[in-house]
Image (cartoon, rainbow, N blue to C red):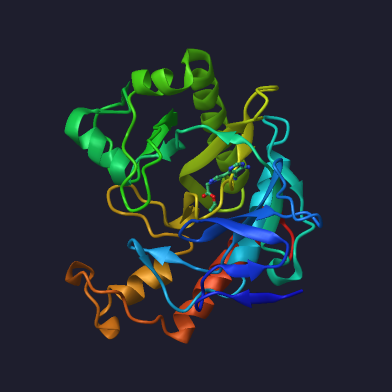
């Protein structure tokens, strides 16, 4: 199988697949049949070992990160199968991406980032501090960074073009984009997915503060919403260690705290405000970070990585 990796850490060249799209940490490919014809009903979703923090791509990569998060996402799709169908077709993937790639059903993706928040932080907290509500939902007074919300709140955003920031969508904008019924169903499902995620994760010492999921529909319009992309991973969600939860200040990240603390320490010689790319992560930070991804997987699934 002729396989090479493009520029170091880039997207691998996969024999029998055409590279279609690169996200920060994942890539999409189109399968090409033996007759040279591209499949129109399937895609290959590949998770890299790249880590993004502070809006920068870290170097070096985190060994096994792609495989750990792919297996975690597959496990969540299974846990959620009673709630919503998903796009997973098979894990019969090229050797070069074994364990970190999934063949998925090709869908028409909704143009809404379906985000739900169970705890208030980041952009949601900033919006709340400005006006006491988030995405049109009035919240109790006196909430602070890390406060648990009475129940998960749907806080959708646009899918901004590469390099631009996703923008909050008001309920009427979501309805204009999706129609009232689909908008209501996307909101219901996104909140139910996060609630289920926290029921399971909470028993294993992990709080999922918020999550982004993506839905699609079958191209022929048959059937309803299908859960796509990845689900309830530390890349699509904020994972917090439950035992350190303390509202009133930024919570430590379950998986990115070692990277953040090293990058903001004097030892790194980097300052976020410099606008310069951060330095290479030292080996101990890479290994500690890998261990946190493995720990999250093993705690949640009960399986050994
Ligand atoms: C680089 C990874 O891709 C994305 O980040 C977002 N994205 C998903 C699709 C998609 N398109 C059709 N069918 C699907 N099943 C999917 C999925 N998942 C396109 N971009």
Q: Residue 81's spot in the image, x, y percent?
A: 72, 35
Q: Quadrant of the N terminus?
A: bottom right
Q: Which of 183 and 16 lies nearest the eye of the viewer?
A: 16
Seen at 31% across and 54% down, the residue is 250
Going by the image, does 203 lie left or right of 135? right
Position above or below: 69 against 177? below
Taking 200 as reference, is 213 left or right? left
Which residue is more in the foreground, 10 or 40? 40
Tell me, yes or no, if residue 305 can be seen here: no
List x then y, in percent, for residue 121. Answer: 33, 45
Residue at image coords 38%, 35%: 157
Residue extending furthest toward the top: 180
* Rendered image quadrant of residue 113: top left
User: How far across and how far down the image is residue 17, in percent?
Assistant: 68, 60
Residue 303: x %, y % from top left: 74, 60
Seen in the picture, residue 159 relative to 267 is either above or below; the reply is above
**As drawn, is 199 to the left or to the right of 159?**
right
* Quadrant location, the C terminus: bottom right
Quarter where residue 185 is shown: top right
Q: Is residue 210 visible?
A: yes
Q: Residue at x 28, y 85 (%)?
A: 267
């Amino acid at each position: 199988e002729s396989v090479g990796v493009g520029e170091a850490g880039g997207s691998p060249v996969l024999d029998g697949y055409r590279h279609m799209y690169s996200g920060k940490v994942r890539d999409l490919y189109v399968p090409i049949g033996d007759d040279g014809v591209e499949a129109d009903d399937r895609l290959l979703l590949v998770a890299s070992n790249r880590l993004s923090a502070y809006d920068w791509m870290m170097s070096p990569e985190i060994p096994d990160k792609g495989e750990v998060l792919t297996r975690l996402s597959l496990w969540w799709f299974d846990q959620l199968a009673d709630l919503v169908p998903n796009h997973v077709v098979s894990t019969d993937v090229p050797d070069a991406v074994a364990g970190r790639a999934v063949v998925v059903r090709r869908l028409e993706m909704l143009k809404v980032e379906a985000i739900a928040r169970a705890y208030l932080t980041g952009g949601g907290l900033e919006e709340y501090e400005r006006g006491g509500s988030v995405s049109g939902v009035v919240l109790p007074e006196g909430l602070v960074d890390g406060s648990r919300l009475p129940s998960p709140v749907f806080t959708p955003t646009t899918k901004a073009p590469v390099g631009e920031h996703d923008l909050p969508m008001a309920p009427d904008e979501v309805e204009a984009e999706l129609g009232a019924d689909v908008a209501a169903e996307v909101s219901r499902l996104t909140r139910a997915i996060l609630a289920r995620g926290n029921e399971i994760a909470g028993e294993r010492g992990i709080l999922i503060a918020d999550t982004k999921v993506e839905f699609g529909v079958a191209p022929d319009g048959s059937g309803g919403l299908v859960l796509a992309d990845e689900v309830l991973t530390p890349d699509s969600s904020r994972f917090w260690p439950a035992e350190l939860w303390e509202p009133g200040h930024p919570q430590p990240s379950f998986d990115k705290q070692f990277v953040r603390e090293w990058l903001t320490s004097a030892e790194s010689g980097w300052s976020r405000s410099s606008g310069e790319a951060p330095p290479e992560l030292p080996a101990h930070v890479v290994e500690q970070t890998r261990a946190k991804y493995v720990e999250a997987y093993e705690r949640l699934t009960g399986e050994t990585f």
